[in-house]
């Protein structure tokens, strides 16, 4: 393990001498997930969720898969709803959904593998996540203000600037950025190959000339300072010469957001939202934006048609019949009140 790595929790839950417990079936299920080429991130999420569920079951003397019924799973779902984090806040709907989806996947496997007779989780309801709009989108001038925050007199500052330039130019996800390798960027054609992005899908997307210029500077002047004997061919390396950590990326962008004093909140995904919204406002076809972002369903991309208010304003101004009509006689306050009441 490289420095800064995270040690997995491998402490058995329940009777360590009983191979038929929920814990040991969880290990077999996770191994099956690896064989089925489920992404490592999804597998680790399942491990965390199932350990939480099995710990809850162990506290109630529920040790084996056959002990779990649908009413018990519904009790656990209520437990998730009422659970509070260390800061007193409830679990997000997305977090609750993650737990239930992991449990459903595990019990589906238990049933198909004939470890249990029926699946108690088959009809378990999944919490619905509201489809909200991105809260904050940056304007082009605000993006420039944010990009200008790193100290370019330091190697770390240049690396931070390059990372944000790539995020803004491509709209890729933070994990996709972490996994970029040097040869994934074609400097001549201005393209980036996203290898095994979300859903384990590859896609080729454009990257702007300005971002390419910054990447060149980083490769020539900065990256050699981070390379070690054990370094792989990843583009962005941490101080140990290892792959950049996704949480570090979020903290880095959040730091510069605060420093920029823009009065808006956001992190790596803010660049993704901003790029898609600004491209749409500038006339890009939503299907091309879908391809760049790597959305499997265009409905996911269409959220930006609601965020891109400027295009709606332009259409409203150009087509509304009352666009150029100014009131000849401004209604008096009493007359205005009557109008509003009617």
Image (spheres, rainbow, N blue to C red):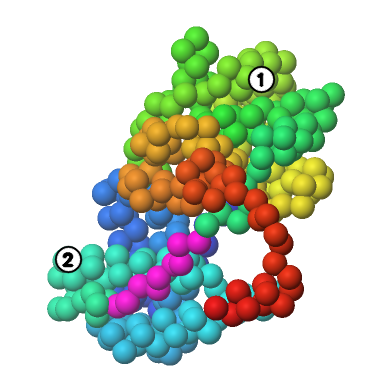
* Residue displayed at 68% across by 16% down: 217
> Is residue 113 or residue 295 the one in the foreground?
295
Q: Is residue 100 above or below residue 215?
A: below
Q: Which residues are magenta?
A: 124-132
Residue 312 visible in the snapshot: no
Q: Which of pointers 1 and 2 indicates the residue nearer the eye?
A: 1
Residue 167 appears in the rendering: yes
Secondary structure found at label 2: loop
Vertical side of 282 occupied by 190: above or below? above
According to the image, label 1 marks what residue?
A: 214
Q: Residue at x 47, y 44 (%)?
A: 319
Residue 107 at x, y = what percent?
A: 27, 71
Q: Quadrant of the N terminus?
A: top right
Q: Nearer the viewer, residue 2 or 203?
A: 203
At label 2, counting other C-alpha atoms closer than 10 Å, the crowd grade (few under 14, some 14-19, many 20 or more) is few
* Residue 76 covered by magenta stretch: no
Earlier-in-chain disc, 1 versus 2 = 2
Which residue is the site of mark 2? 113
Location of residue 320 in the rendering, given as x and y in whole percent from the top left corner: 49, 48
Q: Is residue 126 magenta?
A: yes
Q: What number of labels is visible?
A: 2
Image quadrant containing the C terminus: bottom right
Lateral position of residue 328 relative to residue 243, left or right: right
């Amino acid at each position: 393990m490289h420095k800064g790595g995270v040690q997995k929790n491998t402490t058995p839950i329940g009777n360590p001498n009983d191979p038929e417990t929920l814990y040991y079936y969880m290990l077999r299920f996770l191994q099956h997930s690896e064989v089925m080429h489920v992404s490592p991130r999804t597998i680790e999420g399942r491990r965390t969720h199932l350990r939480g569920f099995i710990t809850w079951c162990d506290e109630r003397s529920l040790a084996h898969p056959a002990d779990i019924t649908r009413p018990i799973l519904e009790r656990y779902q209520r437990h998730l709803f009422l659970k509070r984090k260390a800061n007193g806040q409830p679990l997000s709907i997305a977090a609750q959904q993650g737990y239930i989806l992991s449990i459903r996947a595990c019990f589906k496997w238990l049933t198909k593998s004939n470890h249990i007779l029926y699946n108690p989780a088959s009809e378990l309801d999944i919490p619905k996540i509201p489809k909200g709009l991105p809260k904050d989108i940056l304007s082009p001038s605000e993006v420039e203000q944010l990009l200008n925050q790193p100290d370019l007199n330091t190697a770390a500052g240049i690396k931070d600037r390059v990372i944000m330039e790539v995020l803004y130019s491509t709209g890729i996800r933070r994990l996709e950025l972490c996994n970029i390798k040097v040869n994934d960027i074609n400097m001549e054609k201005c393209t980036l190959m996203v290898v095994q992005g979300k859903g384990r899908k590859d896609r080729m997307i454009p990257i702007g000339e300005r971002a390419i210029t910054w990447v060149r500077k980083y490769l020539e002047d900065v990256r050699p300072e981070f390379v070690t004997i054990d370094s792989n061919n990843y583009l962005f390396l941490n101080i140990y010469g290892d792959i950049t950590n996704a949480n570090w990326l979020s903290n880095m962008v959040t730091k510069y957001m605060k420093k920029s004093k823009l009065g808006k909140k956001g992190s790596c995904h803010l660049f993704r939202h901003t790029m898609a919204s600004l491209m749409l406002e500038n006339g890009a076809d939503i299907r091309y934006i879908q391809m760049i972002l790597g959305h499997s369903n265009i409905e996911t991309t269409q959220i930006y048609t609601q965020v891109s208010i400027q295009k709606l304003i332009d259409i409203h101004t150009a087509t509304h019949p009352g666009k150029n009509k100014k009131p000849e006689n401004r209604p008096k306050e009493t007359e205005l009140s009557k109008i509003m009441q009617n």
